[in-house]
Image (tube, coloured by chain):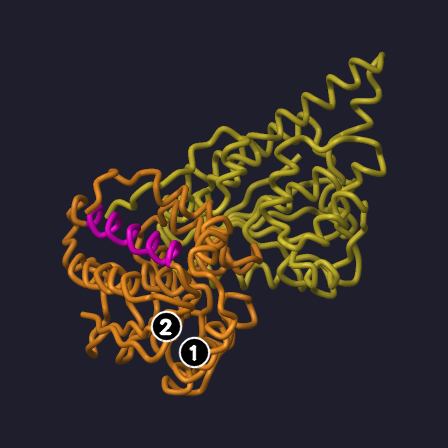
Chain colours: A orange, B yellow
């Protein structure tokens, strides 16, 4: 599932195990509870780093679990909306240290962070939906639009289902920087985290500003949400 | 007018004639019926390539000469308005087309012609000849709403938008690539079309489901769907 560590003012949330870290309700609930803990424990200027063990950052929704059940897919979508909204309102800067493949909802999870650092030489970002005959929901599109600036890069990601390597992703303005190994990626994330903590920003102000910047995404997340706090 | 051919998986839509391929009411009608045919014959792995005959023009936009040949200023304005309104379904058809679309420009694309090119998923043009040009500011014509939305959706850089819309800039192939407006520029008509065909074959080999492709495309351009009155929203994907 996931583990939470605190190193000084830096929270590290790790998706654990060597599997694909598919975003089924169990994993998402576990992330949700970790984010709740983070909010409870953050007293001063803090930072969140999200990373993962193994070959995958996250391979997206658990389609096997969903088994073509529309209500199960809807449930995963509703829960995932919740944690992305949580991340967008988190009172501290967020960094995704992408140490493996991130596809579909897993790519969206990475993009839901303020900074994205990634490992090169294996692992790519991939909106797999088109290749799997799945349409992409409006809130995914809103996040992609807010985080990927060039129309041609957006087209390549969703309408060509490119498998984007870390270096390509930097070139296309999708992520911030690329590193040679998982360790270096996490190290760089910690370095960046310390720098951001050193700015001594007020968490709630930071969150407010981020919510304004990503207001289109929050709007789309709330449209089509059943309203129940799952 | 325009012709429609099918070679394997690739549909070729060609604006015909050795003139500047103005978007007159007749050409617009012809485009609408051709695109409707393409949509109805679509299968997995279909791709559309739009191009034009000759080596000087893709299209110079609406048939202003026909508009101005009207008896009075008000009839001229009506004629232009008629073309502007009747072109919207062409944009809608391209936005909803259940396959990837590629525009291969053999020459200039100005005003409505530039807009027509912009409505494609991929644009290839020549580096040796031909420009992209929104002439409206030079002609003293305001942009129809869907033109503005299309440019906002497809031209990302703030300075590029300003140069295109407010600057009346005439943009050659390599500059257009640098500005992120077109995908690549080639040194002849033949190599432009050849590259378009190769790209088309590569996209065709992905064998995407056309309906899914079209829905994702519409989701990518929700504002354009809105101004054209097309439903775009996907709340939760269905398996």
**Picture coordinates of residue A87, whole percent (x, y):** 36, 58
Quadrant of image for the N terminus of chain A: bottom left
Picture quadrant where residue A43 is located: bottom left
Picture quadrant where residue A111 is located: bottom left
Question: Is the residue under label 1 in contact with that under label 2 (CB below 8 Å)?
Answer: yes
Crowding at mark 2 (Cα within 10 Å: few <14, some 14-19, many 20+): many
Chain letter, disc 2 residue: A
The residue that appears at 46% across and 64% down in the rendered structure is A114
* Residue A75 counted in the magenta span: yes
The residue under label 1 is A189
The residue under label 2 is A49
Picture quadrant where residue A21 is located: bottom left
Tell me where the magenta segment starts and ends, as one range.
A73-90
Residue in front for this viewpoint, A191 or A111: A191
Crowding at mark 1 (Cα within 10 Å: few <14, some 14-19, many 20+): many
Relative horizontal placement of residue B135, taking residue A69 as reference (left or right): right
**Picture coordinates of residue A219, whole percent (x, y):** 41, 42
Relative horizontal placement of residue B83, taking residue A61 as reference (left or right): right
Relative horizontal placement of residue B23, taking residue A196 as reference (left or right): right
């Amino acid at each position: 599932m996931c583990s939470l560590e605190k190193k000084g003012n830096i929270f590290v949330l790790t998706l654990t195990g060597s599997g694909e870290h598919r975003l089924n309700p169990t994993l998402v609930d576990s992330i949700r509870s970790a984010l709740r803990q983070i909010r409870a424990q953050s007293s001063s200027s803090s930072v969140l780093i999200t990373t993962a063990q193994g070959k995958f950052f996250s391979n997206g929704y658990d389609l096997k679990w969903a088994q073509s059940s529309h209500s199960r897919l809807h449930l995963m979508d509703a829960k995932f909306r919740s944690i992305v909204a949580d991340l967008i309102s988190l009172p501290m800067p967020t960094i995704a240290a992408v140490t493996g493949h991130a596809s579909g909802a897993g790519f969206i999870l990475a993009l839901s962070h303020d900074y994205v650092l990634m490992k090169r030489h294996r692992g790519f970002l991939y909106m797999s939906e088109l290749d799997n005959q799945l349409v992409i929901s409006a809130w995914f599109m809103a996040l992609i639009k807010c985080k990927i600036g060039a129309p041609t890069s957006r087209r390549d990601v969703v309408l060509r289902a490119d498998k984007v390597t870390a270096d390509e992703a930097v070139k296309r303005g999708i992520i911030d920087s690329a590193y040679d190994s998982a360790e270096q990626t996490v190290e760089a994330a910690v370095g960046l985290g310390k720098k951001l903590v050193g700015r001594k920003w007020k968490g709630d102000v930071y969150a407010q500003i981020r919510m304004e910047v990503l207001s289109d995404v929050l709007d789309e997340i709330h449209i089509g949400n059943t309203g129940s706090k799952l | 007018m325009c012709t429609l051919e099918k070679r394997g998986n690739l549909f070729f839509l060609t604006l015909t004639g050795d003139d500047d391929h103005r978007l007159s009411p007749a050409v617009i009608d012809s485009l609408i019926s051709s695109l409707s045919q393409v949509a109805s014959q679509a299968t997995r792995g279909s791709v559309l390539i739009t191009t034009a005959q000759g080596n000087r023009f893709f299209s110079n936009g609406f048939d202003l000469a026909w508009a101005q040949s009207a008896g009075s200023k008000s009839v001229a304005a009506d004629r232009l308005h008629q073309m502007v309104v009747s072109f919207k379904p062409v944009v809608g058809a391209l936005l909803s087309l259940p396959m990837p679309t590629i525009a291969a420009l053999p020459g200039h694309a100005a005003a409505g012609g530039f807009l027509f090119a912009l409505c494609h998923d991929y644009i290839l043009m020549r580096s040796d000849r031909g420009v992209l040009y929104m002439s409206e500011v030079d002609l003293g014509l305001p942009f129809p709403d869907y033109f503005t939305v299309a440019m906002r959706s497809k031209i990302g850089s703030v300075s590029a938008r300003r140069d295109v819309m407010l600057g009346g800039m005439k943009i050659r192939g390599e500059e257009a690539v640098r500005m992120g407006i077109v995908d690549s520029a080639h040194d002849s008509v033949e190599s432009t079309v050849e590259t378009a065909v190769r790209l088309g074959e590569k996209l065709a080999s992905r064998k995407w489901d056309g309906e899914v492709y079209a829905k994702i495309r519409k989701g990518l351009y929700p504002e354009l769907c809105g101004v054209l009155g097309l439903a775009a929203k996907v709340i939760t994907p269905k398996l």
